[in-house]
Image (cartoon, rainbow, N blue to C red):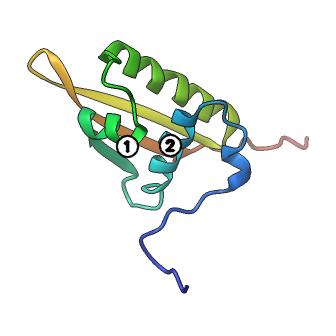
Amino acid sequence: INLRQQFTQYFLEDVLKFKSEYTWRIYEMCMSVKSQREPVLILSVEEFRERLCIPESYRFINVRRVIENSIAEIEEKTDYTVTVGMKKKGRAFNRLDFKIVKKQQQQLNLS
């Protein structure tokens, strides 16, 4: 089909290790921006809920727990570090900024 642009590429082996579907989706979204000069994914909280199919009944504290658990799992099971910035508008969070960075490999000391 000759795909050259506008697609996300990642190793299937990486995502098969995840226990949570939310982790898989967050990882997939972050991988879609990793090749950009500034690898940041910016989403409104509503868009984030929609993309992950998070139920309306979840309060933001539950959404935050989903994010924290997913980031911990991504960092534990892949070669990437993900950070999230939560921006407020008034008293409520309205924007999420995910940044993904490949972990630095440690140098072997052969002395």
- Residue on which disc 1 sits: 51
Q: Determine which quarter of the picture holds residue 73.
A: top right
Q: Secondary structure at mark 1?
A: helix
Question: What residue appears at the point 47 percent right and 23 percent down from the top-left corner?
Answer: 66
Horizontally, is 68 left or right of 92 in the view? right
Question: What residue appears at the point 8 percent right and 19 percent down from the top-left corner?
Answer: 90
Above or below for 24 versus 34: above
Q: Are marks 1 and 2 in contact (CB under 8 Å)?
A: yes
Where residue 76 appears, as percent x and y from the top left, is 67, 30
Question: What residue appears at the point 42 percent right and 56 percent down from the top-left corner?
Answer: 33
**Number of numbered tags placed on the structure image:** 2
Q: Secondary structure at mark 2?
A: helix
For label 1, count other residues whose C-alpha is less than 10 Å away and answer few (under 14), some (14-19) or many (20+). Answer: some
- Residue on which disc 2 sits: 25
For label 2, count other residues whose C-alpha is less than 10 Å away and answer few (under 14), some (14-19) or many (20+). Answer: some
Above or below for 63 versus 27: above
Where residue 32 appears, as percent x and y from the top left, is 45, 57
Closer to the camera, 65 or 99?
65
Which residue is at the far bottom? 2
Where residue 111 appears, as percent x and y from the top left, is 91, 41
Horizontally, is 41 left or right of 3 in the view? left
